Amino acid sequence: MKLLQRSLVARIIASLLAISAMALTSIVVTMVVANGSRGDAAAINVAGSLRMNTYQIVAALQRYEQQPDETQRERVEALGERFRERLASPRLTEALPEAEDHPLQQHYRMLQARWDEALAPQVTRTIDGGGLEVEALRQTLDELVDDIDQLVTHLERNSEAKIRLLSVLQILFLVLTAVVVAIALYDIRHNLVAPLHQLVVLAREAGRRNFRYRTRLKGSDELALLGRTLDTMAGELATSYAELEERVSLKQQELERSNQVMQVLHDGSRALYGGGNDLCASAAPMLRRIEQLLDIGPIRLSLHDPFDDREVPILATHSRSRPTYCRDYDCHACLLEPEPLELSETGEAECLLLPVSVGATLLGTLEVWYSRDRGLTDSTRRLLNALTDQLATAIYLQRRIEEQQQVTLMNERTIIARELHDSLAQSLSYLKMQVARLERMQAREMPREAQTAVFGELRTGLDSAYRQLRELLTTFRLKLEGPGLQSAMRQTTEEFAERLGFPVELCFDVPPHLLNPNEEIHVLQVVREALANTHKHARAHWAAVTVGFQQARLHVMVEDDGIGLPDDGSPPMHYGLVIMRDRADTLGGEFRVRNRQTGGTLVELTFSPKTARLIAQQPVRGPETTTIQHGHRD
């Protein structure tokens, strides 16, 4: 019983088993009753035929009485034998109940006694010639027929009783089956259908993110247990969903804040990378904005001094005063906050120290103060790491720019010194020698005519030195319209075109950033010196400058259609060609001056730029390496 109370499945199975058992019992009872009534109809027929047989025997006796012959006698004997056979027929005896006190048994024995004691003796006496007593025979016949009628009546009643019993049993099993079905339907309706409907509603509401619905099922069966479990689950899901919504909201706010910080970092990168040396003015607004978004601060930036191995503070947000090593007192990036933040001394604030480094090179440190109660999330730490990387890149680029400016300045000074040494210094040295010569001649009181030649050489040397000085000043004062050698070449050809009185053709085919500043100055000076010689000595009407790059070598040619050189050599007392050869040797190239076949002079300079030499020194890659690289690029 406890199992039936606790299990809906057990109750349904019990109902099905009960219905099946009653149906099976009904079938078995029907089969038993039907089997017990199988011979009733035959017995009734046999009993009814006894009455007809009795009349036939009486009629045969009367005819035998009237006409006693052998045929009639055989007829009477045959009818008597038939009566006995039918009375003892199995179809009749098997239909009788086995109980000896049953009315059918009593009537059967009475009928058998009536035959044996009354009618059978009269038949035997008549056949034996004793005569027929009509009144006695009629009385016996009536009694026998009455006994047969009673037997047939009892047989019919017995058969009808069986049929009534079968009907009662069928009705009883039908009523029991209907009761069991009604109980099962009621149980299914209240303990299966209704709970299932509530469970479906609970599932539908849960699918709509409504976790407030409850089934509140009572009982101890499976669906009640499932309903209580789902109610508990719905409550837990409601709590979890609320927590997840809160976490999603916090994550969304954190992502929005991170996006704003990334936007600030992106916008601040322009100021960091394009602000020159003013790191404070470019970084301070970005750091202050990041403080507002991340609710942290103050932030302090210190640069690492590799010589003294110490940290030098250069920037602090929310500061009351300037940093100790502030370089620009016109900058107020650190002093924009009217109410500087106070750092707690009771341990409520903590400091996160982040290295500002590029690779293994430590450039500085970034101090980030924050509240211990709020702490720092992982996303905030990642954003601060991105900030330090950006600051490191900006500081590193700034230092590289300063170093490059220093290197460029030193290179320019070296180039100017070399140019002065190669041109003006040599001329001044020559003039100094001539002055010493003149002093010796005056000391010897040589004739004025001999000194006149020295004065001429001094004048010529001074003119040459002055011309070279003007050439150098013109070269160093060139205003380049664009970066690189091509702009300087264009200005040079335009300048000498005005001097010569006709256009100077320029053909320039060199990749950008091929030459370093030193090589560009040497090439430009060679071209200017060659065009100056064309202006002074060639008496030309056409000139052209060609600068090209082929097979990792730079080719520079200056041509004119003037008078040319008498012997393809340097003219006496002219140092221009010597200086150009020195420049070619400095560049590690070849310098040639010769006459053109069509007339005029050709000045040619060929050398390998430093970048081209570096490329040539790289190992040659085989076909497999090239194929892999092409495949990687694809």
Image: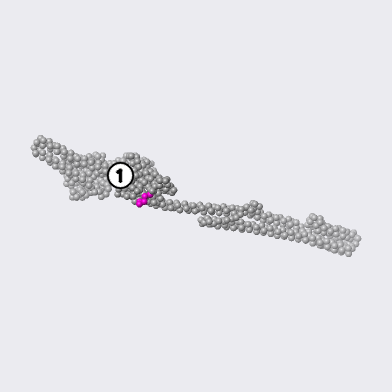
Q: Which residues are magenta?
A: 337-341
Instruction: From the viewer's side, name the closer residue of 403 and 518.
Output: 403
Q: Which residue is mark 1?
A: 402
Residue extending furthest right? 130
Would residue 322 appear left or right of 541 to someone viewing this image?
right
Q: Position of residue 36 (x, y in %)?
A: 75, 56
**Residue ID at (62%, 54%):** 8
Identify whether 289 is placed above or below 605. below
**Dominant secondary structure (helix, strand or loop) of the stretch shown in magenta:** loop
- In the visual, does 460 lie left or right of 634? left
Query: Counting other residues with Cα less than 10 Å from the Cα at mark 1, is it few (<14), some (14-19), or many (20 or more)?
Result: some
Q: What is the quadrant of residue 55 in the picture?
A: bottom right
Horizontally, residue 539 falls left or right of residue 137, namely: left
Horizontal side, residue 57 vs residue 565: left or right: right
Residue 92: horizontal and vertical position, in percent?
Answer: 79, 57
Instruction: Mark yes or no: residue 486 visible.
Output: yes
Residue 63 in view, yes or no? no
Give the total of numbered labels.
1
Q: x, y (%) of residue 109?
A: 83, 57
Relative to 363, residue 60 above or below: below
**Amino acid under disc 1:** Glu
Give yes or no for residue 573 being in the magenta stretch.
no
Report the coloring of the rendering.
Answer: one colour
- Quarter holding residue 536: top left
The local secondary structure at tag 1 comes to helix
